[in-house]
Amino acid sequence: MSERNWGSSMKRKWLVTAVLAVSLLAGFGTHGWSQSRPLSFGVIIWRSPTLTAQFWNPILRYVSERSGVPLQLKVAQTGTEHSAMVRRGELDFLYSNHNFIKENGESGYRVFARTRGDAERGEIVVLQQSPIQSLSDLEGKEMVFPHAAAFLGYHLPMDALLRKGIHVKPLFAGNQEGAMGQLKAGRVVAAGVNAEVMRAFAQRENVAYRVLWSSEKYLSLALSALPSVPPEKVKAVREVFLQMAEDPEGAKVLESSAAVLKQASPLRFIAAKDAEFENMRRFYRTALVKVELQ
């Protein structure tokens, strides 16, 4: 199937799935804040919209109830659509890295937290039994990526290939796990991925794979707020995220969400600043890969 036809097919698939995800949006009970306009909370699209909603809605419901700031999940169909929403400043709160793309900088999102843990890597991976042994073996081959706006899954791997003079035929699956599914099915010889998401996917789906290339580590995702969000609302949301793992009820919510993705450990949020993501901004200033945005 051609890239264009495959892309159209995938987009129709995600459109249907996105409709399903809407039905999973969190309800906000009968507290006083329920009459307020919900503030949008955009999440990077690594997995299907359904899985994304199943993971995030319980967390946002908890944060909304404890902070008094109603939050509503907003999931784009594809990564490029998510990036366009970030660039236009359509999302009040954000769990993403698309605000660090140079072209999206004018939206002005301000980092206030991130998840605790090691920084993440981008990888180029193949199935364990693949005859591909080195990056040079990929010359002229079809390779799948999440989408054209994926930092770890596309920008880093493709930039590495271009710097080595290796040219592949890129295909885009829509999100991280979509790309991994195409690799698992044998439809492509290699995939550009987020290392952590790939490990979790491989464990859940029983996929044996090898890493051909790995990037340096980057603090990838941050919790950020649009400058127009009132400071008191940002502070309230920030405090609940930072204290969530210490509260028995909050910890239970995080554990339940982790179980949806079969993660080894639940998320834990810590304070963060924009300066911690400088190496990502530096990458975009010198990258060879073309950043294609809608």
Image: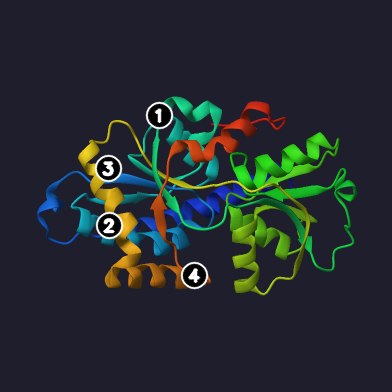
In the image, which disc is placed on residue 108? 1
Q: Distance between the residues labelled 4 and 3?
A: 26 Å
Q: Name the residue under label 2.
A: 63
Mark 2: secondary structure: helix
Which residue sits at x=81%, y=42%?
168
Q: How crowded is mark 2: few (under 14 residues within 10 Å), some or many (20 or more)?
A: many
31 or 237: nearer the viewer: 237
- Residue 202 position in % (x across, y down): 65, 68
Mark 4: secondary structure: loop
Left or right of 83? Residue 291 is right
Mark 1: secondary structure: loop
Q: Can you see residue 58? A: no
- Residue 276 position in % (x across, y down): 50, 40
Mark 3: secondary structure: helix
Q: Name the residue under label 3.
A: 234
Q: Name the residue under label 4.
A: 265
